[in-house]
Amino acid sequence: MKKIFLGLLALGLTIPAYTQDVKVEELSEVVVRPMNYKYLNAADSKSAAVPVKMLEREVARYDVTEADFYQDDFDFYTVSFFIPDGKIVAVYDDDGTLTRTIEKFKDIALSDGIKTALLERFPNWTVTDNVYRVTYSANKGAKKVYKLTLKNGDKKMKVKMDDKGTFL
């Protein structure tokens, strides 16, 4: 039994050594292009919902210079991005740099800061509808506003808040 085990062990260790063929392949050239990091730093908040982050990253990653409609003659390009939860209209310059966006998302998950601020100020009210809007400009940065509809029995109220939970 001991000899069979040692024989199988020796066979198991030597067979893989003969089956490996080393192939050397030369890879094609890769061009690394930075994303629109200024937009991501300004618009991408840690407390935003997952669909918002996902679409904002897609906008930052998009390369308008690789698109079929790209021509050197135009000064800017307007590109729309859609998901069921919202949309982003982005403007790129002729170099492919993101210059401004308009974003609108409906009925997304609210951050903890917003929920806490609402509970402190309006304890018996519930959120029935919400809209998250972001306007980004390369010169001014991003402005983020939540428009919330609150309901308490027959009463309705509309409230505006920033992404940190401050009432506007």
Image (cartoon, rainbow, N blue to C red):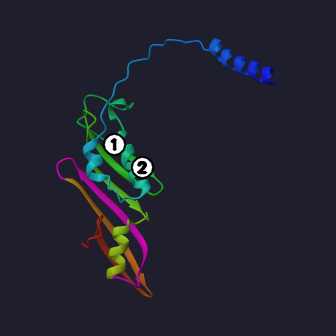
- Where on the picture, by quarter, is residue 99? top left
Q: What type is the residue that disc 1 sits on?
A: Ala
Q: Would you place residue 91 above or below residue 144 in this image?
A: above
Residue at the disc numbered 2: 54
How far across and how far down the image is residue 9, in percent?
71, 21
Task: Tell me, yes or no, if residue 39 can be seen here.
Answer: yes
Q: Is residue 109 left or right of residue 96?
A: right
Q: Is residue 25 left or right of residue 138?
A: right
Q: Is residue 103 left or right of residue 11?
A: left
- Where on the picture, by quarter, is residue 20? top right
The secondary structure making up most of the magenta span is strand
Question: Is label 2 in a helix, a strand or a loop?
Answer: helix
Which residue is drawn at the image coordinates 35% and 82% (left, top)?
A: 122
- Where on the picture, by quarter, is residue 67? top left
Q: Nearer the viewer, residue 155 or 114?
A: 114
How far across and how far down the image is residue 125, in percent?
40, 82
State the quadrant of the N terminus: top right
Q: Mark 1, residues whose alpha carbon is within 10 Å: few (<14), some, or many (≥20)?
A: some
Q: Would you place residue 75 above or below residue 57 in this image?
A: above
Q: Which region is colored magenta?
A: 122-140
Outermost residue to the right: 1
Residue at the disc numbered 1: 60
Residue 19 lies in the magenta-colored region: no
Which residue is drawn at the image coordinates 35% and 74% (left, top)?
A: 116
Residue 124 circle label: none
Circle nearer the N terminus (1, 2)? 2
Question: Is label 1 in a helix, a strand or a loop?
Answer: helix
